Image: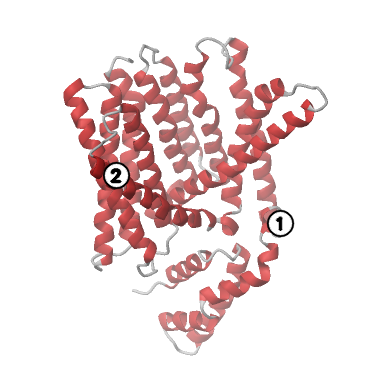
Amino acid sequence: MFELESEIQLWKDHLSGRGNFTEADISELEDHLREEIEDLTVAGLSQDESFLISVKRLGNVDAVSKEFAKVNTGNLWKHLLIDPVDSAAKKESRRDIVLVMIFTLLAGTLIKIPALFGLGFDDPGADHFYVKNISLFILPFIAAFFLIKKNATRKTWLTIMLFFIIAAVTINIYPSVTPYDTEILSSLHLPLLLWLIIGIAYIGKQWQGSQGRMNFIRFTGEMVVYGVLVSAGILVSGLFTLAIFGAIQIDAEKFLKNYYFIYGACGAVFITVYLVEAKKSIVENFAPILAKIFSPLFLAIMVSFLVVMIVTGKSPFMEREFLIAFDLMLALVLGLVLYVISSRNTRQPANFFDYLNLTLIVVAFIIDGVALSAILFRLSAFGITPNKLAALGENLILLGNLGGLAWLYIGYFRSRCDFIKLEKWQTDYLNVYLIWTLMVAFLFPIFFGFK
């Protein structure tokens, strides 16, 4: 059954995906589209006929986009800095900027408070405390930022903040016992778990829906890309400050270490959150372009690695440190794959990057299988340890994720399923990561006696 509003929304999504239109531009085009549809409907055409003819009359989207870009390229970066024209949007933008400043100050101050009780960065035992708690100093404020933006209900506020409180209390009452394996595992998995909880605040009521979760995956990708750029700017600014004050024989190192880089790091996080959320209509296609550039590069590296490993008969998978590093590499490759998927128009026919994505998935699947066999060998030879069990679980989860994506891609190429099923598979699979990070962060320490 034809649904006009759904079709218009898909058309708008496709238009925004061209990367050269602001929300105001899309709204203007939408007004023209609706006027055409209304005129044709009055003339006696059905809604689906009116929609198709109206879209055709507006012209090819790609052509319109390119022509628009030629005229408006000079204004692109201005939109990143100027306030919206609409008064309500302007008020919301200024409120968000105030929130960014407030949360930066709160997070930075929260990081410095433990120093008043003998837990400064250089104090004995401080390293364990900060490793466990660094994410808890910042992530709750990001959740609060989105809860305010989404006008969340009191129940949602209480639920999400209660989870952060329980996580903070639990992670800090767990004892530190040598060799600290479970403590390190908890510290590594807790930020991932809390980030998924932030996803609930970001998406709101749409958390159960595939599209809402895919939006959060897309947002996460944008955060990584722009976070690196903003952090680089903060770092360069700090080094510049050190250099110019050093030129007049004033040592600014203590100030930078104790204040600038702490508050600057917090500011980088919240500035990134604000920019990605507020300016996504202008820069949202930058990260997918980077993903498409690096996907072939990673594919070439991983294929070369497989070939050299087979030819030389040498495998690095017996080294524990390498297995951990390679899991991170597989997670990065999966991130590239997912970001290409998340930025893709589901109505678009199969293209080169779809086949490239499948090839990258298959190669990663093979390497993950080899790593998994090495982990199983180490478990049988040396026994169960927290690190080995965590590595086993993570490789099994990655293997399942990659295998599911590969199977659905093949089905899509053979016209046995729609591309939307790939998105649904991945968004549903977020539940697996949520459960696993919860287990490693809170149950592994108990199971292994906090060692």
Earlier residue among tags 2 and 1: 1
Residue 300 sits above or below residue 24 on the image: above
Look at 44% across and 87% down and name the residue there. Answer: 45
Look at 52% across and 49% down and name the residue there. Answer: 222
The residue wearing badge 1 is: 87
Label at residue 43: none
Using residue 221 as the reference point, say whether residue 87 is left or right of it: right
Which quarter of the picture shows residue 189? top left
Q: Is residue 59 visible?
A: yes
- Please tell me whether mark 2 sits on a helix, a strand or a loop: helix
- Please tell me whether mark 1 sits on a helix, a strand or a loop: helix
Q: Position of residue 125 (x, y in %)?
A: 50, 11
Q: Is residue 209 visible?
A: no
Along the line of sight, the residue nearer the viewer: 388 or 436: 388
Colour setting: secondary structure
Q: Position of residue 219 (x, y in %)?
A: 49, 49
Residue 194 sits above or below residue 88 on the image: above
Q: Mark 1: which amino acid?
A: Ser
The residue wearing badge 2 is: 308
Along the line of sight, the residue nearer the viewer: 358 or 407: 358
